[in-house]
Amino acid sequence: MAALLGCYRKGRIAAAGAEAIRFGTAIEQERRHTRMTILRCDKERRIARSAGATDVNPML
């Protein structure tokens, strides 16, 4: 409980807010990276398929 009350001090709230923003930004960047990776894989697979290759893993 004392640790919880400590978070309500001004500096701690600012630090916690900045940490939450940083964490949220990191999650968003990771999401964007994952989306770009999926798109790149799709593109590469389409190119390979058009060149006559069959999918190694049809689940992807």
Image (spheres, grey):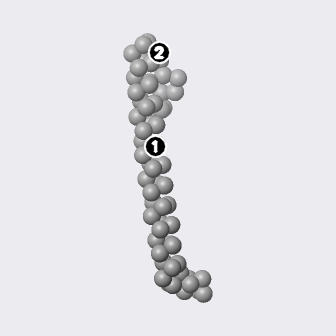
- The numbered disc on residue 53 is 2
Query: In the rendered structure, which amino acid carries the disc numbered 1?
Result: His
* Residue at image point 48% right, 55% down: 26
For mark 2, give the secondary structure. Answer: loop
Image quadrant in which the N terminus is located = bottom right
Give the residue furthest to the top. 52
- In the depicted structure, whether residue 16 falls above or below residue 6: above
Binning the other alpha carbons within 10 Å of mark 2 as few (below 14), some (14 to 19) or many (20 upward) gives few
Residue 23 versus residue 39 in the image, above or below: below
In the image, residue 52 lies at what x, y percent? 43, 12
Tell me the CA gap for discs 1 and 2: 26 Å
Question: Percent from the top left, x then y, of residue 41?
Answer: 45, 30
Give the quadrant of residue 47: top left
Residue at 54% from the left image edge and 86% from the top image edge: 5
User: Residue flagged by tag 2: what amino acid is it?
Assistant: Ala
The secondary element bearing badge 1 is classed as helix
- Which one is in front, 43 or 19? 19
Q: Which mark is residue 33?
A: 1
- Give me the residue at 47% from left, 75% from top: 14
Q: Is residue 2 above or below residue 37?
A: below
